[in-house]
Amino acid sequence: MMHILAIETSCDETGVSILKDGRMILANLLSTQAATHAPFGGIVPELASRKHMEMVQPMVMQAIHQSGIKISEIDAIAVTYAPGLVGALVVGVSFGKALAYALNRPLIGIHHLEGHIQSIFLENPGLAYPFIALVVSGGHTNLYHVEKAGVYHSLGRSIDDAAGEALDKAGKMLNLGYPGGPVIDRLAKGEAPDQYRFPRAFLSKTSYDFSFSGLKTSLRTFLEKKTEGEVKSELSRIASAFQEAIVDVLAEKTLRAAGAFNVQTVVIVGGVAANSRLRARMSEEGERKGIEVLIPSPGFCTDNAAMIAMAAVGHFEKKDFASLDLNPAGSLALEEAVA
Ligand code: KG4
Ligand code: ZN
């Protein structure tokens, strides 16, 4: 039996999870700070650190209690060390180090994006490599060719805003609160996406990079020409059209990559993978092209610690441990982290 305890504090959610034998989630606790940051219309890093500080210790205790195992039965401590808000990462990394030292167990440093990619194995334990992985979140839009366990080839990334960031900024412009992504998803449901048209940036025919800042600007220009009343009455149509512009580009590039690399499976992970329109479109188009599309349940798409525990399994097996001088990194490419 092997138990990994994982801690995630890279952004605005504190997560603690205990995973048994790389398969069974014994505990998966999440504390969201959304209400703390909402009045500011975005994440306030200082507040994020303080909230993690307040939550991490009681959550670790609660996870151990809930799992039914003794603290001495933990075999390794995994912690997200990059990328993210440095002050937030410091909290989880410091706590993870202290716990690893006190229990005399190995420490495993996990790159947040490897966590997102590995989240797919929580519900698809038999998934075979290779596959294409699209990581779409508030901070990232990255496309990878995942050749085999631990080997991630970067194909492209956003050259400006991440997809989730674009949705959240649109949400702000539309007065939907923060984060706007889930609200746009809800508003757009059942609304035809073609009542307005916003630009799609494909960059070039062969590029796997993304760009969403032009789309954001086009929404701003569009809104400037409308009265408040018009925007209010058109809200769900605008949301649906804006969301569609993002989904179109994500779907086209991801499925094109699968064809180009002759890969049968694509996985979509990260907070934006919770988007119901993206899920539906990817599944439909995948089916049409004979490509298997796998997406975690929404709760495993957004930040969580179970995915960090899952990512740690491969490192544990290879005895790829971090030393107690592990340092958080605010920005670090996945390929550099696992190289
Ligand atoms: O992965 P995540 O929890 O945190 C980061 O690592 O960034 O992703 C958060 C992002 C936010 O931008 C949020 O608006 C977006 O995911 N998001 C959604 C949905 N749920 C979360 N976007 C669209 N539709 C959703 N249902
Ligand atoms: Zn994330």
Image: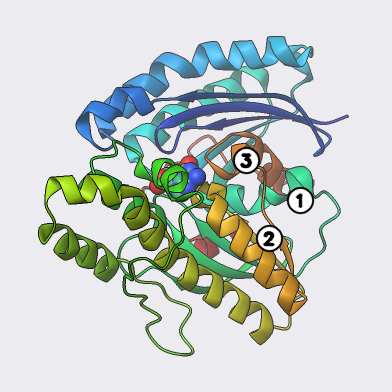
Which residue position holds label 2?
A: 150
Residue 123: give x, y in percent of width and height: 77, 44
Q: Please tell me which residue is depicted at 40% across the width and 52% down the height of the picture.
A: 164
Which residue position holds label 3?
A: 300
Q: What element carries label 2?
A: loop
Mark 3 in CB contact with mark 1 (< 8 angstroms) = no
Q: Is mark 2 within 8 Å of ligand 2?
A: no
Q: How far apart are marks 1 and 2 (CA)?
A: 11 Å
- Which quarter of the rendered picture does the C terminus lie within? bottom right
Left or right of 318: which side holds 203? left
In the rendered image, the vertical position of residue 206 relative to residue 222, given as above or below = below
* Sequence order check, earlier mark of 3 and 2: 2
Which of the 4 quarters of the picture holds residue 126?
A: bottom right
Type of residue at label 3?
Phe
Left or right of 249: which side holds 300? right
Q: What element carries label 3?
A: helix
* Sequence order check, earlier mark of 3 and 1: 3
Left or right of 25: which side holds 274? left
In the rendered image, the vertical position of residue 25 relative to residue 274, given as above or below = above
Mark 1 in CB contact with mark 2 (< 8 angstroms) = yes
Let me know if residue 166 appears in the view. Answer: yes
Q: Nearer the viewer, mark 1 or mark 2?
A: 2
Image quadrant of ligand 1 equals top left
Type of residue at label 2?
Gly
- Quick one: label 1, few (<14), some, or many (20+) residues within 10 Å? few
Q: What element carries label 1?
A: loop
Give 327 or 182, whichever is nearer the viewer.
Answer: 182
Which residue position holds label 1?
A: 318
